[in-house]
């Protein structure tokens, strides 16, 4: 399959040649359960890559390996030009400020208010003076961006699932990361809320000039935002290409994803 | 049958090894910057706040009951005047620390297991890690330190109320004045009663924090995992308290025999 670099969906100023993420030969097994089996992927600056795969195919495992929450058995990962496998813990912390991660279940800290949730990533980030010194403003702007300015002093339990997802999104974005990773941003949400989240993601991509990896089952979501779709099947990068390319494919495995 | 016994032994040693590693990690990370002082203070407050009323009430009742129960026996031997000394030694040396620690195991260790366990299950711990905060430091170190520091204070409170309960019985049944009672209490206590008893309460506090956070931190996925974490935290913490108590007594004994 070829990559869909012909159609530029992001505004100018992005360098499609500069890789932000390179995964080579990633392997991960749990006992005899081989989840990732020689997985390869390169992502370029400004790109939105959608990773699709069946439930249990190892999508969450893959992104957890990317941010260092899981250790792969073997393989190379480099993010923003830094080797993620042999990185010191200090450097890893620094690098993590450039990666935003939206968890599948939102993962808001339920003993803290929305405000404290958003302030949390700013702790110990003295190097980002412009953000930590105007904490109040940064937090309200981030929350405003997802349309939830009025929830500043609520607890997560007082929010609906969709609101939680949006707060989590604001939290992931608060350090203005260069690379955003969304693990199923629309799962468990109604179609209208899903659309809102998708629009929000697109908007963020354009205004922040980030690169994004989006994991989803949602074909509509993939169609709307993907520059490139990657199919994760049997632990490998089975096929990749634009929505149109893949949807027109004759391969049975690929067809299974796109028939509605 | 044989297989399952062998398996149990294996599990036991595996668990002990993991718990020890967890404890070692605590000592490694506790003295390294950044220190989470605010979180530590909040956890100290939580530990106190959660167990204060329970500790106070139980301490008071134990003092009452202990005195009421032993009074007839002492009376038989004509030794009622020994009551304050007897009560003070048994409460300060043994009953106070152990009862308070057991209450905290029920209240605090299970709370820690459930709290941290649910944070593990809902990926809040992972979220902390990716946002550049060391969750072990933020969640585990602060909580273990808090229980270690707070337990001795709770024990002092429990002891005090226990002695006060005992005084009330003595006062109503035997007309012993406040001054007389507490003079005798403090006369009976010696250096070797107070120091080992206080030292072991720090260990009790450490054990409670350690087991509670360990159960939560290593919690298995799913809501059943959280329940199991809370439950095993109480059981193991209580067991550890008795083991530490036993060892403390043996060691103290050796010390003062020399
Ligand atoms: N910590 C773990 N220990 C053991 N096995 C695991 C662990 N995490 C994931 N797995 C296994 O890895 C496989 C992939 O899981 P993963 O969560 O990545 O799936 P997924 O593609 O994200 O699915 P979903 O779309 O349902 O989120 C599953 O078979 C799961 O059982
Ligand atoms: Mg997943």
Image (spheres, rainbow, N blue to C red):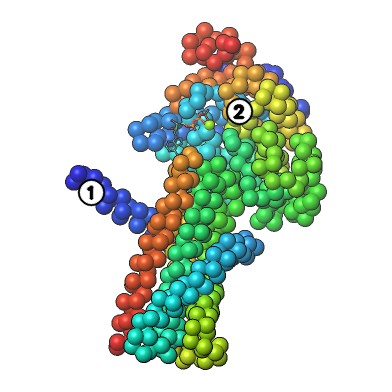
User: Where residue B242 appears, x then y in whole percent?
Assistant: 37, 67
Q: Which numbered marker is on residue A187?
A: 2
* Label 2 near ligand 1 (CB < 8 Å): yes
- Answer above or below: position of B66 versus A197: below
Q: Residue at x 18, y 46 (%)?
A: B2
On-image quarter of the C terminus of chain A: top right
Q: Pointer 1 indicates a residue of which chain? A: B
- Answer above or below: position of B61 versus A225: below
User: Where residue A136 appears, x then y in whole percent?
Assistant: 79, 51
* Residue at the disc numbered 1: B5
User: Where residue A4 appears, x then y in whole percent?
Assistant: 63, 19
- Separation of marks 2 and 1 at Cα, in angstroms: 45 Å
- Left or right? Give the position of B88 relative to A190: left
Q: Viewer-nearest of labels 2 and 1? A: 1
Q: Pointer 2 indicates a residue of which chain? A: A
For the question of whether residue A68 can be seen, the reply is no
- Left or right? Give the position of A222 relative to A255: right
Which residue is more in the foreground, A96 or B200?
Answer: B200
Which residue is more in the foreground, B163 or A81?
Answer: B163
Q: Quadrant of residue A159?
A: top right
Please count the marks in the image.
Answer: 2
Q: Residue at x 48, y 30 (%)?
A: A58
Callout 2: SS: loop
- Left or right? Give the position of B58 relative to A13: left
User: Where residue A87 appears, x then y in whole percent?
Assistant: 52, 48
Q: Residue at x 46, y 67 (%)?
A: B101
Q: Which numbered marker is on residue B203?
A: none
On-image quarter of the N terminus of chain A: top right
Which residue is more in the foreground, A226 or A117?
Answer: A117
Callout 1: SS: helix
Which residue is more in the foreground, B104 or A133?
Answer: B104
Q: Residue furthest left?
A: B2
């Amino acid at each position: 399959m070829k990559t869909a670099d012909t159609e530029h969906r992001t505004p100018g100023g992005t360098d499609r040649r500069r890789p932000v993420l390179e995964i080579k030969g990633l392997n991960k097994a749990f006992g005899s359960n081989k989840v990732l089996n020689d997985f390869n992927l390169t992502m370029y600056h400004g790109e939105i890559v959608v990773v699709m795969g069946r439930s249990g195919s190892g999508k969450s495992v893959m992104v957890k390996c990317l941010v260092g929450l899981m250790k792969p058995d073997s393989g190379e990962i480099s993010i923003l030009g830094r080797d993620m496998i042999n990185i010191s813990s200090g450097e890893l912390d620094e690098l993590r400020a450039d990666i935003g991660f939206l968890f599948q279940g939102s993962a808001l800290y339920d003993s803290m208010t929305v405000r404290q949730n958003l302030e949390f990533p700013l702790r110990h980030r003295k190097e980002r003076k412009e953000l930590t010194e105007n904490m109040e403003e940064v937090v309200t702007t981030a929350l405003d961006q997802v349309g939830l300015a009025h929830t500043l002093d609520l607890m997560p339990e007082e929010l609906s699932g969709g609101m939680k997802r949006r707060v989590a999104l604001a939290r992931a974005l608060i350090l203005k990361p260069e690379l955003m990773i969304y693990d199923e941003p629309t799962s468990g949400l109604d179609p209208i809320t899903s659309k809102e989240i998708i629009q929000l993601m697109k908007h963020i991509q354009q205004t922040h000039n980030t690169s994004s990896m989006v994991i989803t089952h949602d074909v509509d979501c993939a169609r709307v935002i993907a520059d490139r779709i990657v199919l994760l099947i049997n632990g490998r990068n089975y096929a990749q290409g634009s929505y149109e390319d893949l949807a027109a494919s004759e391969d049975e495995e690929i067809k299974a994803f796109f028939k509605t | 049958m044989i297989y399952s016994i062998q398996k149990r032994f294996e599990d036991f040693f595996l668990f002990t090894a993991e718990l020890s590693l967890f404890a070692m990690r605590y000592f490694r990370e506790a003295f390294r910057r950044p220190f989470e002082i605010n979180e530590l203070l909040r956890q100290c407050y939580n530990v106190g706040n959660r167990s204060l009323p329970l500790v106070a009430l139980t301490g008071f009742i134990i003092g009452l009951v202990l005195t009421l129960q032993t009074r007839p026996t002492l009376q038989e031997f004509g030794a009622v005047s020994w009551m304050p000394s007897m009560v003070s030694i048994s409460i300060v040396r043994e009953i106070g620390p152990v009862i308070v620690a057991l209450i905290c195991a029920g209240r605090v260790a299970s709370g820690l297991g459930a709290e941290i366990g649910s944070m593990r299950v809902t990926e809040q711990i992972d979220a902390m890690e990716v946002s550049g905060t060391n969750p072990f430091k933020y969640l585990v170190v602060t909580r273990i330190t808090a229980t270690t520091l707070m337990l001795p204070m709770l024990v002092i409170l429990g002891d005090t109320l226990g002695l006060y309960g005992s005084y009330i019985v003595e006062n109503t049944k035997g007309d012993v004045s406040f001054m007389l009672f507490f003079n005798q209490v403090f006369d009976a206590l010696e250096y070797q009663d107070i120091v080992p008893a206080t030292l072991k309460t720090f260990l009790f506090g450490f054990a409670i924090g350690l087991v509670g956070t360990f159960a939560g931190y290593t919690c298995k996925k799913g809501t059943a995992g959280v329940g199991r974490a809370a439950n095993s935290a109480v059981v193991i913490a209580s067991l550890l308290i008795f083991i530490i108590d036993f060892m403390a007594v043996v060691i103290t004994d050796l010390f003062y025999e020399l």
